[in-house]
Image (cartoon, helix red, strand yellow):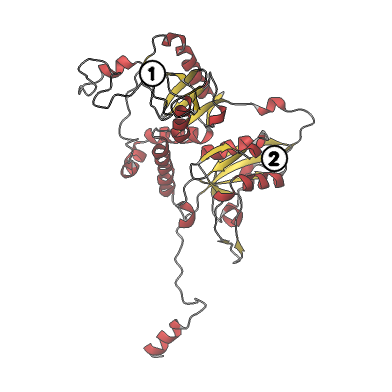
Amino acid sequence: MDKKDLLDLIKDDDSGLLDIQKKIIPATSDDRLIESFLEINDFFNTHKSEPKSGGDIYEHKLASRLKHIRENKNKIEYLSKYDINKLLVSHVKEFETVSDIFEDDDMDLLSMEDSSIFNIKNVPEIDKDRSDPDFVAKREICTDFDKYEHLFNQCQRELKNGTKKLSTFIESEMKQGDFFILSGVLIYLESIFDPYRGNSQKINRRTRCIYENGTESNLLLRSLGKRLSEVGYSVKDVVDSSTDISNDDKETGYIYILKSLSSDPRINTTKNLFKIGFSTTSVEKRIEKAEQDPTYLMAPVSIVATYRCFNMNPERLERLLHRFFGESCLDIEITDKKGNKYIPKEWFIAPIFVVEKAIELIMNGEIVNYIYDKDNKIIVKNKI
């Protein structure tokens, strides 16, 4: 066969029989280590702080993972080129009071002419009576902070022991006496004052917010809600649903959250991708052969969280999930080992704290009152 005949044969290969298939290289332990650390980086980039123990299940897992990496010199050295947020280089010194911060200011970066950290300079003066909801209230020293310090200590203890957790912030649920996390700082909403109409004629309320660093502010309630919606969390009690279980309740299985360990670029480049499913058997047993099942994207998976369920209807769960995350479903076609095409269900693109909140709403029956805003990545009240 001459060269021309060979080229004609290749050109006429409509079925692709002569295409060279790329060999899929399975992920190594080093690959998984890098992927696990990149997950921590993603968390830091999103929340502007490293994961802390005692938060939600996902954050607690990342905090534990970071701790073990920091304790292994070989892992630190191997991951150094991926440490874009300097999480493995050095640890920030912890301070107990505002005074400790200034005493540690060796480079005199915090010094001011009048020695007050609460005077803002070189910015236009702001009218204190301004009613614009975006008005940023000035923080001042909280002179009676000793009345509230024990509340912050108790809240921190409860976050650590698991009786409280960080939850998706929902503005309509804000009330006096609640705790919130804003940009890594714990806030106590001490008071919400009577509503009034400002220059814009919109009803608003002034608040008294106490911060764990010993300061306070009188933020407008709408301004506080806006900031918390962007970069904040609510601190909620962890409800032990087992205390409400009676002999009439039937244990039906587990709701689970999974993360794919696929090497397929269509999958491993999709951030915040999780599978939410239901199993009547243990989740570990259910996913034993995940790499052979298109339901699990023909790849191994890791368990993010499981929830024990009573009286759960799997079909209803699936309907609720697809109604809630309908616009955030993974749109992909998977081919199994027999060449059959399959479109997997129950894989959704949403931050883990949103997924966990959605499951909480499903289990308490309140999910019908909420919708997922995929553009802002938050759960909001259904206005209909």
Q: Name which residue type carries label 1.
A: Asn
Location of residue 167 with respect to 301 vertically, above or below:
above
Image quarter hosting the C terminus? top right
Which residue: 23% across, 15% down? 115
Residue reaching furthest right?
248
Counting other residues with Cα less than 10 Å from the Cα at mark 1, is it few (<14), some (14-19), or many (20 or more)?
some
Residue toward you, 167 or 217: 217
Residue 264 seen anywhere in this rendered image of the structure: no
Q: Is residue 352 left or right of residue 68?
A: right
| SS category of the residue bearing label 2 | strand
Q: Is residue 364 left or right of residue 90?
A: right
Which is nearer the N-term, disc 2 or disc 1? 1
Q: Which residue is mark 2?
A: 253
Q: Is residue 326 left or right of residue 313?
A: left
Q: Name which residue type carries label 2.
A: Gly
Residue toward you, 156 or 19: 156
Q: Which residue is mark 1?
A: 213
Image quarter hosting the N terminus? bottom left
Which residue: 22% across, 19% down? 112
Q: Position of residue 174 (x, y in %)?
A: 54, 26
Q: Position of residue 188 (x, y in %)?
A: 47, 19
